[in-house]
Image (cartoon, rainbow, N blue to C red):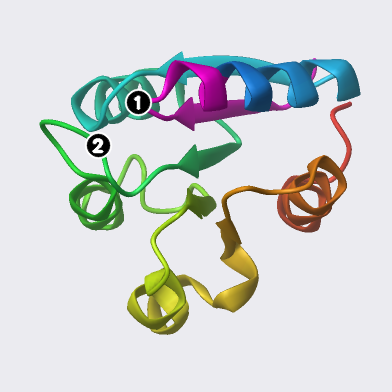
Amino acid sequence: MPKTVLIVEDEEAVRELEKFILEAEGYEVMEARDGLEGLAKAEFKKPDLILLDLMMPDVSGGRMFDEMQEHPATAGIPIIVVTGKPDAHEIFDDQIGQKNVVMKPFEADALLDRIRDHIGDPD
């Protein structure tokens, strides 16, 4: 059974690009358009990894990150923050480490390398 990645991203073009890259490698992909949907899917489906945008409507990626860390069902799921926010490293380095922040625009190989560091190949 392939490993599952949940993409939480409000920009459709970015979400579709991430989905295309991951599915081409053989990962199963779930999508969420905002933090509320992302939290619900993370709790219900328990993906192997989450790609999380920071700046989203309703529940921001930062708030979603905090809530997931506090909830026993989702606290152990690895998170890679994918963002265009220039100070993201400063915000998240202490919590998840610099290697877990990918800056937009990103290169597909760099994103896949980070994912493989956490969950390995898709199968």
Which mark is on residue 73?
Answer: none
Image quarter of the N terminus: top right
Residue flagged by tag 1: what amino acid is it? Asp
The answer to whether the residues at label 2 and label 1 have Cβ atoms under 8 Å apart is yes
Residue flagged by tag 2: what amino acid is it? Met
Secondary structure category for the residue under label 1: loop
Residue 60 % position (x, y)? 20, 44
Q: Nearer the viewer, residue 77 or 112?
A: 112
Q: Nearer the viewer, residue 99 or 46?
A: 99
Q: Going 61% across and 29% down the picture, which residue do you hit?
A: 5
**Mark 1 — residue?**
10
Q: For label 2, count other residues whose C-alpha is less than 10 Å away and answer few (under 14), some (14-19) or many (20+).
A: some
Is 75 on the left or on the right of 21, as rendered?
A: left
**Mark 2 — residue?**
56
Start and end of the magenta stretch?
A: 1-15
Residue 94 % position (x, y)? 41, 84
Q: Which of 52 and 15 is in front in this view?
A: 15
Is 31 on the left or on the right of 60, as rendered?
A: right
